Image (cartoon, rainbow, N blue to C red):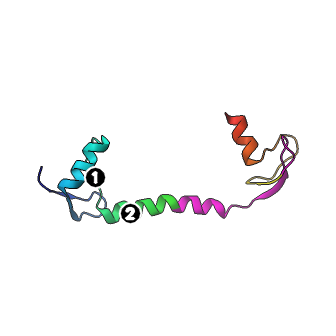
Amino acid sequence: MPDKNIVCKDCGATFVFTESEQDFYREKGFDNEPQRCPECRSARKQARQGGFHRDRDREMFPATCSECGKETMVPFRPSGDKPVYCRDCYRDRRG
């Protein structure tokens, strides 16, 4: 299977989808060819990871876990009328 030239759907640059990359995609069971050049794929990945970093900047509030009594921080101001759980207890309750 020869190398393929593909036009990036984001920036319009032409990039090569090599024969070895095609073999990799086939081995992994990927049905579609890449639609973005390596640079745009990398930029999208960085942007997705950046979203998680923005969450770290949220205002956090101290609370005491209603389940285990551990001191924790939560991303909302506890009102006192509903239980508040630490990360571990919350995860355990969700299943």
Q: Position of residue 12 (x, y in %)?
A: 24, 63
Which residue sits at x=14%, y=56%? 3
In the rendered structure, the answer to whether residue 14 lies left or right of residue 41 reads left
User: Which segment is the magenta one?
Assistant: 50-70
Which residue corresponds to the image point at 87% horizontal and 46% vertical from the top-left?
Answer: 69
Q: Who's the residue at 24% across and 54% down the image?
A: 21
Q: Is residue 53 magenta?
A: yes
Residue 25 image position (x, y, % from top left): 27, 47
Q: Amino acid at mark 1?
A: Pro
Q: Secondary structure at mark 2?
A: helix
Q: Identify the residue at the far left of this view.
A: 2
In the rendering, which numbered label is found on residue 34? 1
Left-right relation of 91 to 22:
right
Q: Is residue 59 in the magenta section?
A: yes
Task: Report the disc number at residue 42.
Answer: 2
Q: Please state which of residues 44 and 64 is positioned toward the viewer in this rendering.
A: 64
Residue 80 at what x, y percent from top left?
88, 45
Residue 49 picture location, percent across and down: 51, 60
In the image, 28 versus 91, the foreground residue is 28
- Given residues 78 and 86, the one toward you in this image is 86
Q: Residues within 10 Å of mark 1 (few under 14, many from 20)?
A: some
Instruction: State whether residue 32 appears in this view.
Output: no
